[in-house]
Amino acid sequence: EQATERVLARLSEEAASVPAAVAARLGAEAEEALHAAFAGTLLPGYQRASTQMFEQLHAAFTSGTERVTSALSAEVSPVATQLAATAEPLASIEARLGQLLADVQAAASSAAAASTAAEEAAQSAAAAAASAAAAS
C-alpha cells in the first residue's frame, strides 16, 4: 500500500507539472505563430489599406482645393480686370491733381508777391504824400 501511495504521489506531482510544461511549450509556439501571422498577413494588409486611404484622402483634398481655386479665380478675375481698367484713369487724375496743386501754389506765390508790391507802393505813395505836405 505504501508503494502504491508513493507511485500515486509521484504521478500527482508529474501530473501537476504537465500543464505548466505544455503551456510553456505551446506558449512559445503560439507566440511564434502569432508573430508570423501578424507579420505575414496583418501588417501587409494594414499597409495596403492605409496606403489606399491616404491616396483617397490626397485625391479628395487635391480635387477640393482645385475646385475652390477655380471658383475663386472665376470670382476674382472680373474684379482684377476692373481694377486694371481703373488704374489708367486714376493715374491720369493723379497727374492732373498734381498739376492743379502746382498751379495753385504758383498762383499763391504770385498773389503774395503782388500783395507785397502793392504794400510797398502804398508805403511809397504815403511817404511821397507826407513829403509833399511837409514841403508845402
Image (spheres, rainbow, N blue to C red):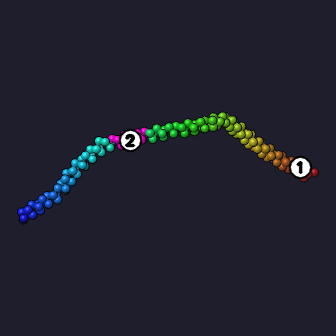
Q: Residue at x 93, y 51 (%)?
A: 136
Instruction: Point out residue 6 in the picture as x, y percentages from the top left corner.
Output: 8, 63
- The magenta-colored residue range is 44-55
Give the amino acid type for the residue marked by disc 2 in the picture.
Ala
The crowding category of the residue bearing disc 1, from other C-alpha atoms within 10 Å (few below 14, some 14 to 19, many at least 20), is: few
Kindly give the residue lying farthest to the right in the view shown. 136
Residue 104 is left or right of residue 65, and the answer is: right
Kindly give the residue lying farthest to the front in the view shown. 1
Whichever of callouts 1 and 2 sits on the residue coming sooner in the sequence is 2
Residue at the spot of label 1: 129
> Does the rendering let one see residue 32?
yes
Residue 85 is left or right of residue 134, and the answer is: left
> Does the rendering let one see residue 84?
no
Q: Which mark is residue 104?
A: none
Hey, which quadrant is residue 87 in on the image? Answer: top right
Q: Residue at x 85, y 48 (%)?
A: 122
Hey, which quadrant is residue 54 in on the image? Answer: top left
Instruction: Point out residue 27 in the picture as x, y percentages from the top left corner.
Output: 23, 51
Residue at the spot of label 2: 49
Look at the image and say whether residue 43 sits in the magenta stretch: no
Q: Nearer the viewer, residue 119 or 112?
A: 112
